[in-house]
Amino acid sequence: MEKLTLLKEAQKTVLDATEPLGCEKVGLLEALGRVLGEDIIAPRDNPPWNNSAMDGFAVRWEDIKKEHEIEKLPALKIIEDVQAGTAAKKTVGPGEAIRIMTGAPVPEGADTVVRVEYTEPSSDSVRIFQPEPKGANIRQRGEDVTQGATIISKGTRLRPAEVGMLAILAKSFVLVHQRPRVAILATGDELADLDERFDETKIVNSNSYGIAAAVHEAGGIPLLLGIAKDEPASFKEKISHGLTCDVLVLSGGISMGDYDFTRAVFTELGADMHFWKLAIRPGQPLAFGKIRGTLAFGLPGNPVSSMVTFEQLVRLVLMKLSGHCHLERPTVRAVFQEKLSKRGDRRHFLRGILRYENGALTVRTTGNQGSGILTSMVKANGLIDVPEEVEQINPGDLVTVQVLSRDF
Ligand code: AMP
Ligand code: MG
């Protein structure tokens, strides 16, 4: 019997064999979802100058401070109006005020803005009937971003917030990692592609599409190589087309059957193979090696097995190639709702449904866990990760769940 590789070891092996791809410049509007290839250092302060957070009057706090009897305060003289986008020409002196709009720079001499609601302006003067604390309603220069600070770190996946920040920093182009190109090959004489006629001897090639979508979701660029016939020459020809890509993902033909040629063809193409079998379920037969620089995976043919093993290995590799600093899916701890027994040898990934119930996060399986039951993936929003050594889980036990989607 061939040795079963532990998933942890397999993950270390594939990650050790993977280096992040190089970088390219993209326009800011194309940057969403990409992974930053440079640290972003603020070239200037934001806000660039002290500015008013309110419509009101820029004053000297000395003139309006609380200790004064507000009723007895003389009205302040309005010496100028400043709108957003303009700057005051005058300096606020004792007994004076400048009418100011939100966003306008705070004039020289003023240290406080009194909001308009606390004032009673007339044509050339303003009476203040409620004091403001010193410095009120002023956004300080640099309070958001300080010049020279690292605002976004290399390896960050850019979300709308980061894109907005890059605009504040006037970056019209940004350095991001290249997206990994992933060649996808289905194998099997029983497969018909989507638009082909198929009779009762055929099944639809669904793996290529599921895997392509998973590649896309992980930030990669899928390239479909079609379907290889169950003969070595067909495997070889199709695989050769995929070797210009960063990653090659085969599904099927990986077991020990008479028509399983992945192993033979990978070896013939000079693959430097690292493992063939994993101690996980679903997905025990699983090959990984390097063929002329391309990271090559042979995933099991059953649709659920191919998706689950993609999640545990290929996705990690794509995340690393893309330059991410966090490679793994987020996990949560949830209260298991069922009873489960297994042998204490392989790590299991059960398709699970996470839900908040009475304030607690619970998880139950999607039902039939067969590796051909793709509805188990359709219903799942998480993968319940049951370690190798565990033999039993009871209702109420806490389990770890990899979060696939946030709809719970
Ligand atoms: P294999 O490892 O090649 O024997 O594949 C195992 C099973 O997975 C096959 O019997 C098919 O039912 C299924 N299978 C293999 N490839 C695909 C595919 N591309 N799309 C859907 N099902 C597949
Ligand atoms: Mg096959």
Image (cartoon, rainbow, N blue to C red):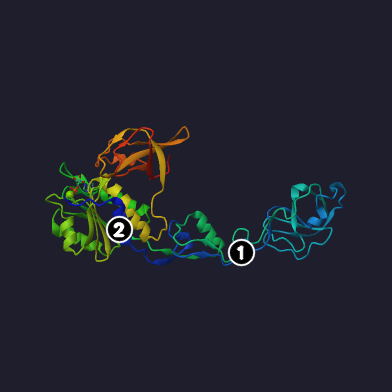
Is 362 on the left or on the right of 107, as rendered? Answer: left
- Work out whether mark 1 precedes mark 2 in sequence or the reverse, and give the earlier one: 2
Does the image show residue 123? no
Look at mark 2 in the image and give the residue it sits on.
14
The verdict on label 1 being within 8 Å of ligand 1 is no
Residue at the location (27% across, 65% down)? Answer: 293
Task: In this rendered view, identify the residue nearer to me: 9 or 219.
Answer: 9
Residue at the location (86% across, 46% down)? Answer: 71
Spot the residue most to the left.
258
Does the image show residue 61? yes
The quarter in which the C terminus is drawn is top left
Closer to the observer: label 1 or label 2? 2
Residue at the location (19% across, 65% down)? Answer: 270
Is 167 on the left or on the right of 225, as rendered? Answer: right
Disc 1 element:
loop
- Res. 274 image quadrant: bottom left
Task: In this rendered view, identify the residue nearer to me: 93 or 101.
Answer: 93
Look at mark 1 in the image and give the residue it sits on.
45
Q: Position of residue 300 (x, y in %)?
A: 23, 49
Query: What separation in Å lies between label 1 and label 2 (alpha carbons)?
Result: 43 Å
